[in-house]
Amino acid sequence: MRARLTREERQRVLIEAALSLFSRHGFQGTTTKGIAQAAGCSEATLFKHFASKDALYSAILESKVQVEETLVKAKQAADRKDDAGVFRAVGLAGLIQIEQDPALMRLLLFSALEGHTLAHTFFETKVRSLHIFLGSYIDARIAEGAFRPIHSLVAARAFVGMVVHYLLVHEIFKIKRPAGFLPEQAVDTFVTLFCDGIRR
């Protein structure tokens, strides 16, 4: 007889089931009944852990998107004025996270295209903090004469955009990566192009 799952284990199973279904059918196309079936439990059990699909979506973001950890590493590089290190920390964290869990990118795209308010919440609570941090760092380096005068927020979004486009090509459109090309090499390429482009 299988041992009963702990509360944390059951929540993790429900989160994984919801992520898988949201990423394949969208937020609107997924039912709580379907999530419960995929997780191997009743719908009543699901509601004991999560009051709604919105609550499940929020739980996915909290468990899967670790922006705070990324910012800690990037801030350490910023304190050393290690320009490449700042952008490498941000780029590599995003690239590795989505490569390890590509369903997350599909979930975010689906919810944004559906116009769901939680997509806006994701941007405001997760993405914007990265943009603001990178923009502030760029502004500081412009003031120090290290970077050329540019619109810092647009530049920050441009760097993040390189990483996101790379992930879209490979994770969504399923275009094969160059043979033997590691995530670290991809990010180093983006960092070199970006930093060389904005340095004085």
Image (cartoon, helix red, strand yellow):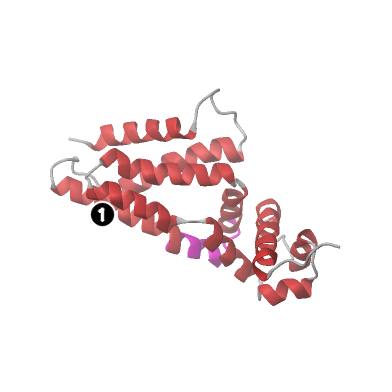
Crowding at label 1, few (<14), some or many (≥20) Cα neighbours within 10 Å?
some
Residue depicted at 57% across the width and 52% down the height: 109
From the top left corner, tell me how far across and down residue 157 is, in percent. Answer: 37, 48
Please indicate whether residue 155 sits to the left or right of residue 45 in the image: left
Q: Is residue 83 left or right of residue 64?
A: left
> Split into 4 quadrants, where in the image is the N terminus?
bottom right
Q: Main secondary structure of the magenta part?
A: helix
Q: Give the range drawn in magenta.
A: 113-124
Residue 183 location in percent, x, y?
A: 48, 34
Which residue is at a point 58% across and 51% down the rendered structure image?
Answer: 104
Q: Which residue is drawn at 55% across and 60% down?
A: 63
Residue type highlighted by circle 1: Ser
Q: Residue 16 magenta-drawn?
A: no
Residue 177 image point, x, y percent: 55, 28
- The residue sitting at the right extreme is 1
Q: Can residue 102 be spotted in the picture?
A: yes
From what the image shows, is residue 12 above or below residue 79?
A: below
- Quadrant of res 112: bottom right
Query: Between 85 and 162, which is closer to the camera in this rendering?
Result: 85
Taking the view exactly as shown, the residue that stands out farthest to the top is: 179
Quickly name the residue at label 1.
136
Q: For residue 69, which quarter of the picture? A: bottom left
Front residue (pair 184, 27): 184
* Numbered label tally: 1
Report the side of 5 relative to 105 (left or right). Answer: right
Q: In this orientation, which residue lies closer to the viewer: 111 or 80?
A: 80
Q: Could you tell me which secondary element the residue under label 1 belongs to?
A: helix
